[in-house]
Image (tube, rainbow, N blue to C red):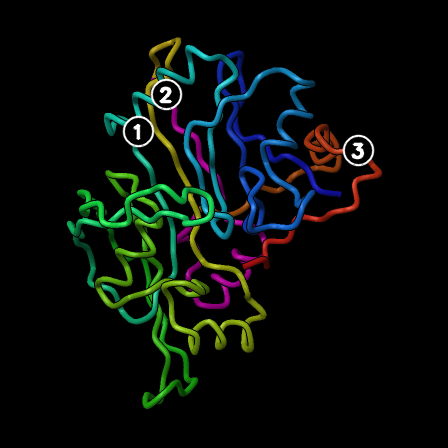
Amino acid sequence: MPYLDILYQDDDIIAIHKPAGLLVHPSWIAPKKTPNLVYSLKRYLRGEPVYTIHRLDRATSGVIVFAKKKEVAQALNAMFAERKVQKTYLCVTRGFVPEEGVIDYALKPIFDKKADPLADPDKPAKEAVSAYRRLGTVELPIPIGKYPCARYSLVEVKPTTGRKHQIRRHMKHIFHPLVGDTKYGEGRHNRLFREHFATRRMLLMATELSFEHPTTGEMLTIKAPVSRKVSELFDQLGWQGLYPAPVERTERQLEALAGAIDDDDSFELSEDSD
């Protein structure tokens, strides 16, 4: 049975560990009644209001924060807009990424023609900045294309702006696309991970958010470990100790986390979803 993995909660905000493959909101691109995080969260809060502050792509897992009060939502939205929230992501890229660097490459806004048919497709590119550092590398004795081996990097990324698909587009820009990214990545590398590691998901995870609590003023850091399956994959690649490992939970903790879902719900959340 699926559950809400609550990372932090108080009277003002709630932070959830979103699994890969789960929509944040209902979407016209998904069949009707496709599970979404906001729906489950509203059920958990028993009809109390919930305000979206930021989003994660469907294929991205990790920490996402919601507000429980309108004034708190306004304060958090201002923090994101003013770049007062520090965001940390973990990803796997093709090739050996340089040890560290900053990608300062403006990105054009992405509009959905069906969702927003009146949007101007010719809007100029906006500032987009992502700092990154390489945590680990691996060379696999698996031929790919004209190369006898396949090389990959484990990378930490801290974006200071929040453009749509920013990390995915920035890593592609420096010729190191994300593994599992079916839009900006490379099919042969995605296939390698499917065939050799049974990994179908995009390997991008929001692992940490740090910001000043809008009510108490205290600095708050919320962390999301990688899933068990991702942890097993990273261990296979020799990256033990380089990533936030999953937290072991007791049966009682798992039962407590299941508060938003009734027993008759017929869907499951799969981190293998694209």
Label 3 to label 1, Cα distance in Å? 34 Å
Secondary structure under badge 1?
A: loop
Secondary structure under badge 2?
A: helix
Does label 1 or label 2 sit earlier along the sequence? 2
**Residue 260 locus on image (x, y percent):** 70, 29
The residue identified by callout 1 is 85
Q: Mark number for residue 262?
A: 3
The residue identified by callout 2 is 76
**Residue 265 locus on image (x, y percent):** 79, 40
Residue stretch in magenta: 219-243
In this picture, residue 189 sits left or right of residue 129: right
**Residue at the (35%, 29%) spot, across then down:** 210
What is the quadrant of residue 39 in the picture?
Answer: top right
**Residue at the (39%, 85%) spot, across then down:** 144
**Residue at the (33%, 61%) spot, across then down:** 136
Nearest the camera: 236 or 12? 12
Q: Is residue 10 above or below residue 204?
A: above
Circle 3: residue type: Asp
In this picture, residue 174 sits left or right of residue 226: left
Query: Are dots 3 and 2 in contact, CB under 8 Å?
Result: no
Is 168 covered by the magenta stretch?
Answer: no
Does label 3 or label 1 sit earlier along the sequence? 1
